[in-house]
Structures are given as structure tokens and as C-alpha cells.
Image (tube, grey):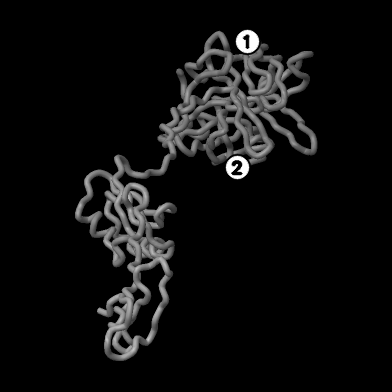
Amino acid sequence: MWPICDTPPEGPACPSRTPLPASSARSCSCSPPSSERPPRPSPTPPRRPPRPAGPTGSIEVTPREGQDAKERLDARSDRVPATVTAWYVDPATRQTVVAVVGPVTPEATEFAADENPAAVRLRPMSAPVRPLQVVAPPQAPTTLVGGTAITAESVRCSVGWSVRSATTLSVLTAGHCTEDAMTWDGPDRRPLGTVTRSRYPTEDYGLIQVGDPSAWRPSGQVAGGPTVTGSTPSGIGAPVCRSGSTSGYHCGEIQGLDATVNYGSGVVVSGLVRTSACAEPGDSGGPFVDPGTAQAQGTLSGGSGDCTSGGESYFEPLAPLLERFGLTLVTGS
């Protein structure tokens, strides 16, 4: 060491002398020659600060690292175990979070393992992620009631009678209705079925085979009237009532058998029964019943007048159709 001194030591001249203030007890300082100064130590490079901890002690990663980890998980999604319910990039830490239901299993750990471990973390969950739709309970079958509405495209008519042929269930209605459309909906707008037999003009009947018998319950009920017990025809002068989706339930009496009607434009229908019961558009195909005997009589073909000022109606007889096509009328409720 070179001392701080008042005068330079003996030997070579002090290469530099720095005057000191007068108040100082010493007048100079001597430094060693530059060639004899000790070497300076090499500077130590600054340490990279550790990555700050994110929420819940997770480690922040770069956005690219987190997204790359997620894409690697996506690539093996076909091997995801049942306990892994989701994975996503956490916007706070940029890590890919793997949500695991229940205890972390070896399968879940293996699935989440990544070439960059810091880019993935596990998150426990108490329940899995699931679609949230509600499965509607099976709808109870709708009862087919005579006189309720059936519709097809822009046409509305009425249910006549429920009939069976072996195990096939059908609805009998008017032929001028089934000639207009092949596929029909029931009273609640659910699909009812498809026309399998139709005749108009000359006669006026149509059969709609019920597409899903579990959705429809046949019956001998008549809207507003009695539940039928059979199909014995009544004679002239007998009371008769009819039901339809427009005018409802109205009564009259049988006034004639085997009537022929000219509906115009060359359309002629014969073999009809004439009654004094009123009817209105939309009532077509609806049932006629003898209210005293609860016997089914037929289905509405046409009429004149209305149910405000009065009128008359004509129906296609039921019994001959049942016999001709081997059909059985559904009776009771």
C-alpha cells in the first residue's frame, strides 16, 4: 500500500500529487503507478429475477407458453380420462389449467404432464362440467275425442271415430278432408298420421293411420256428448247429435236415408243420411251419435245454413264402412 503522507517517500518521484486543503494535517496523497495497480475483478452478470407468483401460488408464464401447452393437451383429447373435465388458459397467469374432479388420479396426472411443467397446473373440482339441457319427460298420450280438430297445411277438419284393423289404429273422418292432404296433425298439433284410404266424391270417407300409437289413446268419446257403446244405425225420426271443431255439439233428428247431394262443379255424393242438426265449416268429418242409445251413426259430409240461424246436415253412415273394410269401432272412454 502507498501511504498517505506529508512528503513523498524516498525513491521514484510520486507520479501524482493531490494538494490537500490547508486545514488538513496532511498535504498530499500518493498513489501507486498505474502499472502496479491490482487488476479490477470481472463484473458479475446480473441475475434474472425469479418469475413472480400468480394467484393461488401459480407461476406466471408467457402467453405463448400457456397456449402451446393447451394445444398439446388438445392434440391428445381423445385420450382424456373421465376425471379431467376441462382445460383452459388462465388469463391471469397464462398457464393452462387442467380441471380434475375428485382426487387426482395417475391417469389425470399423466394426461396433464407437459414438456414445460411450469405451463400447466391442476385445479380440483367437486363436480364435472356437463351440458345443461333438460330432458323432457315422456308426454302422456292424447285421447282421441270425436269432434276435436285435426289439421293439415291450411285445412282444418274434425276427428270422427277411432277404429282398429287388427293392431292398426286409425281415425275415420271425411273424404273431402283427406283428399286435400296426406299428412295430418292431431288436436294438440302433434303429428297424428298419414292417409291410407280416401274416397271423394261418390262417397265421403277417409282413414288416417295413427303414426305413433303410444302418443294417442283411442276412445269412443264425443266432445260434448255421450261416449259410444256401439254402432247400430238409428232410423228416420230418431234423435241425432253431432260434434265439430268449429260449432261444438248440436242436435236434431234423422230426416232421411240414402240422400244424394250435389256439391257443385260435378261433385256428387250419394248414400248420405239427412238430419236437421246444424253444422259449420271446420266441422267436416266430425261424429254423429244417437244421444239416447249412445250408438255411433256416421261422420259429417256437408250441410247448409249455420248454427246461428239454423240449418241441416248430411253424414256418411258408419256401419257400412266398418263392415266393408273389416274395421272395429273403439268404444268406451
Identified by mark 2, the residue type is: Met
Q: Is residue 329 visible?
A: no
Name the quadrant of the N terminus: bottom left
Spot occupied by residue 281 in the image (x, y as percentages of width and height) = 72, 26
Question: 30 above or below 161?
Answer: below
| Residue drawn at 50 percent across, 17 percent down | 228
Spot occupied by residue 146 in the image (x, y as percentages of width and height) = 56, 23
Spot occupied by residue 14 in the image (x, y as percentages of width and height) = 34, 86
In three-dimensional space, the C-alpha distance between marks 2 and 1, rounded to whole angstroms, equals 34 Å
Report the front residue among 36 and 129: 36
Report the front residue among 48 and 151: 48
| Residue drawn at 37 percent across, 76 percent down | 28
Drawn side of residue 310 relative to residue 38, left or right: right
Q: Is residue 311 visible?
A: yes
Residue 36 occupies quadrant: bottom left
Secondary structure of residue under mark 1: strand
| Residue drawn at 71 percent across, 14 percent down | 276
Identified by mark 1, the residue type is: Pro
Give me the disc on residue 239.
1
Give me the disc on residue 182.
2
Q: Earlier in the sequence, mark 2 or mark 1?
A: 2
Give me the disc on residue 95.
none
Mark 1 neighbour class, 10 Å CA radius: few under 14, some 14 to 19, many 20 or more:
many
Report the front residue among 316 and 302: 302
Drawn side of residue 107 relative to residue 245, left or right: left
Marks 2 and 1: CB-CB under 8 Å?
no
